Amino acid sequence: MNIFFDVDQTILGMDNSLRPGVHETMSGLKEMGHNVYIWSGMGIRRETVRRHGLECYVSGLYQKPLYDYVERLEELGLAFAPDFVVDDDPQVVSAFGGLWVPPYYKQGDDNGAMKRVLAAATSFATNGYSDDAHFRARGDLRPLVRA
């Protein structure tokens, strides 16, 4: 699977800290044979990936569309759509399918989100779905309740 992680408030706090569990989650996904990508609505985040030592997990860096999500992929240099996204924006999760995570603001805000990401992505890769309440299949527009 091609798994895309958002940056701001998903894996990176407003204090530039990395959300707890990111290394373990990306490592686990990579070990299972998945491709891990980083994308951001703020452009290519090469420095963020380097600063936090994520290069060994990441297969590519892209700019994330902020509107007309699927329609803009080619324009932004993506020749394929994500199979699973991890994002704090529920609209992006609904557009592509994946797991919504509560926004991460600062060091110490560990809510176990990355463990949920690993479990949901593994379940989706194996069964085509996840029982996590914040999982959405591609195009599922049911509202997500922010925890």
Image (tube, rainbow, N blue to C red):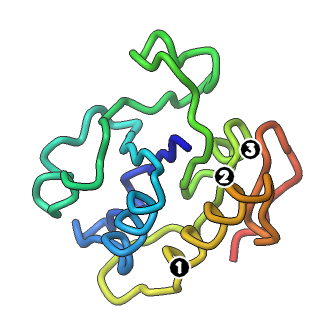
Q: Is disc 2 placed on a helix, strand or loop?
A: strand
Q: Is residue 43 left or right of residue 111?
A: left
Gap in Å between the C-alphas at discs 2 and 1? 14 Å
Task: List x then y, in percent, for residue 61.
Answer: 30, 35
Q: Amino acid at mark 2?
A: Gly
Q: Amino acid at mark 1?
A: Lys
- Residue at the location (81% across, 37% down)? 139
Q: Nearer the viewer, residue 143 or 25?
A: 25
Q: Nearer the viewer, residue 144 or 36?
A: 36
Secondary structure at badge 3 equals: helix
Marks 2/3: CA–CA distance: 7 Å
Q: Is residue 26 left or right of residue 99?
A: left
Which tag is nearer the camera, tag 3 or tag 1? 1
Kind of residue sitting beneath label 3? Ser
Q: Label 3 vs label 1: CA separation?
A: 20 Å
Q: Residue at x 41, y 36 (%)?
A: 41
The numbered mark, 3 or 1, whose residue comes first in the sequence reads 3
Name the mark nearer the viewer: 2 or 3.
Answer: 2
Q: Which residue is mark 2?
A: 98
Q: Is residue 116 above or below residue 70?
A: below
Quarter of the C terminus within the rendering? bottom right
Q: Residues within 10 Å of mark 1 (few under 14, many from 20)?
A: some
Residue highlighted by disc 3:
94
Dot 3, how many residues are within 10 Å of its Cα: few (below 14), some (14-19), or many (20+)?
Answer: many
Task: Point out which mark residue 29 bears.
Answer: none
6 to the left or right of 100 = left
> Of helix, strand and loop, which one carries label 1?
helix
Considering the image in quadrants, where does the N terminus appear? top right
In contact (CB < 8 Å): disc 2 and disc 3 = no
Residue 120's image quarter?
bottom right
